Amino acid sequence: DAKTTQPPSMDCAEGRAANLPCNHSTISGNEYVYWYRQIHSQGPQYIIHGLKNNETNEMASLIITEDRKSSTLILPHATLRDTAVYYCIVRVYGYSGGGADGLTFGKGTHLIIQP
Amino acid sequence: SAVISQKPSRDICQRGTSLTIQCQVDSQVTMMFWYRQQPGQSLTLIATANQGSEATYESGFVIDKFPISRPNLTFSTLTVSNMSPEDSSIYLCSVEDEEGYGYTFGSGTRLTVV
């Protein structure tokens, strides 16, 4: 899996959009960008994933640059409950059919939503 | 996606003893994964457990210290053996999501060794 680089921490005001960057300059053509978050004392939670097009779901939006070397996770209206560590991970998409290797986690970005 | 239950959610253990952590999934899965998260750190993969075969351990983790069982397609256990304070961590199990969304994680077992 390609390595990712994220800022160690970020602050955002409640109600504003939180934009979390991730660099993945060595991403391969068949690797997707996945985002997870870990709220304190819980297991990581899937947020969103994408290949090259921008993606949006009920939790967030994912913007991937045209060269796919970086991406931004956007939480459009951050709340205090969005305070968590956010992990950007690149991996091959899809169910492996039983041959998966598990995830390699970097240090992530600790996002703190300020009231 | 799958729902994972882990037991116990937390425990305080004496050094030199062993603790077995249970992971139950609400659907049949081929692979189950065990992670460790040391205080203030990110998650590190310990091993991958495939039903009917020996677990595959990552570098730095050995079977004698972290024996794993995988008796069926919905259940696995991780034992932390001969514990020392350095084993104080959160231990999490995970399964691959068959719809392609990546992985689902249990809520973890917070272990403190005294």
Image (spheres, rainbow, N blue to C red):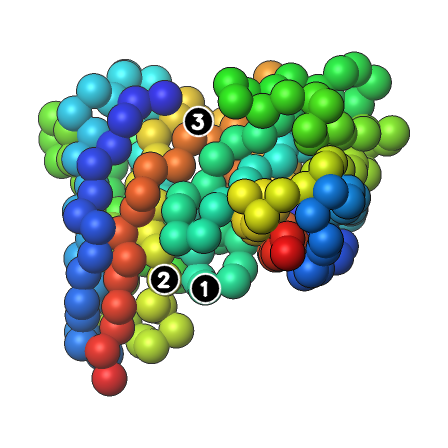
Tell which residue pokes out farthest to the right in this image. B71
Picture quarter containing residue A59?
A: bottom left
Identify residue for label 3. A93
> Which residue does the image show at 86% across and 30% down from the upper left?
B72
On the rendered image, what quadrant is the C terminus of chain A found in? bottom left
Marks 1 and 3: in contact by CB < 8 Å? no
Vertical relation: B11 (above or below) B51: below
Q: In this view, does B83 lie to the left or right of A90?
A: right
The Cα–Cα distance between marks 2 and 1, rounded to whole angstroms, is 7 Å
Identify residue for label 1. A40
Q: Which of marks 2 and 1 is nearer the N terminus?
A: 1
> Which residue does the image show at 34% across and 18% down from the upper left?
A30
Chain label for disc 1: A
Identify residue for label 2. A84
Under mark 1, the amino acid is: His
The reply to whether residue B27 is visible in this rendering is: no
Marks 1 and 2: in contact by CB < 8 Å? yes
